[in-house]
Image: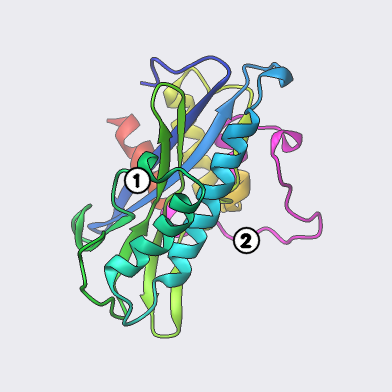
Amino acid sequence: ALTGLPATDAAIVLDIGGTLDGYGSDITRTLWVTGGDPGRGPDERFRHLFAVLHAAQAAATRAAVDGASCQSVDAAAREIIDGEGYGEAFFHRTGHGIGLEGHEDPYLVAGNDLPLAAGMAFSVEPGIYLAGRYGARIEDIVVCGPDGPIVLNEAPRELYVVEGLADDHIGVITKMHHCAVDGVSGAELMVNLFDLSPEGRDIEPPEDRTPEPIPSDLQMVGHALASRARR
């Protein structure tokens, strides 16, 4: 159940995952809960922290090319975070392999000179965490393709500013399941999941954007959680 969640003025790092035909997937997005009070939105330091994280995650993803060492991908994220003074607040590896196991080779971490090869699948998930205050993480599953990285997650990576989370976790799961089977876009799934009005998002998709099919990683999460709720 969703218990112990802050009601207002706080960041939430939401990490969800599931399996499909034995293969795992993950996604992490960061939210800020206002409790319905616009004056309790993220402060300037958190917005800066998140902007740094967003840039670092994008840089690490771009670095995940065929032949690049695992540690070079980690370094791509760390260079940006270190440069903005948050180095000590990024205290875990940038990513891990994922497939039949939730955590497996290749590990994107300093000291691992294993070269990436086409077909490898792994997470790219740097994070910044300020002790006693707040933290943020962005995670995608990426496949090393022959012509560059292929990002499997399509849900927007921007900071979500929301009024609150649904109290009934079954209701949340049901929303996820219905979104998955109805084939809505990744952005619409996030809106439904967090009871988020369109004007609540920091960055809006263009009005003329044609909705894309829901990404498979989110679809498998929806079905996995819905199946668990029915047991």
Task: Name which residue lies at 54% across and 40% down.
Answer: 49
- Residue type (three-letter) at the residue carrying disc 1: Gly
Report the predominant secondary structure element of the magenta stretch. Answer: loop
Quarter of the image where the N terminus is located: top left
Outermost right residue: 207
Observer-nearest of 108 and 187: 108
Query: For the magenta stretch, what is the residue range?
Result: 189-217
Q: Quadrant of residue 123?
A: bottom left
Above or below, 101 against 73 in this view is above
- Judge whether residue 97 can be spotted in this image: no
Residue at numbered disc 1? 17
- Whether the magenta-drawn stretch holds residue 193 is answered as yes
Residue 220 location (% of width, % of height): 39, 51
Above or below, 186 against 171 in this view is below
- Residue type (three-letter) at the residue carrying disc 2: Glu
Observer-nearest of 18 and 11: 11
Element marked by disc 2? loop
Residue 110 location (% of width, % of height): 25, 60
Above or below, 104 against 115 in this view is above
- Whether the magenta-drawn stretch holds residue 207 is answered as yes
Residue at numbered disc 2? 212
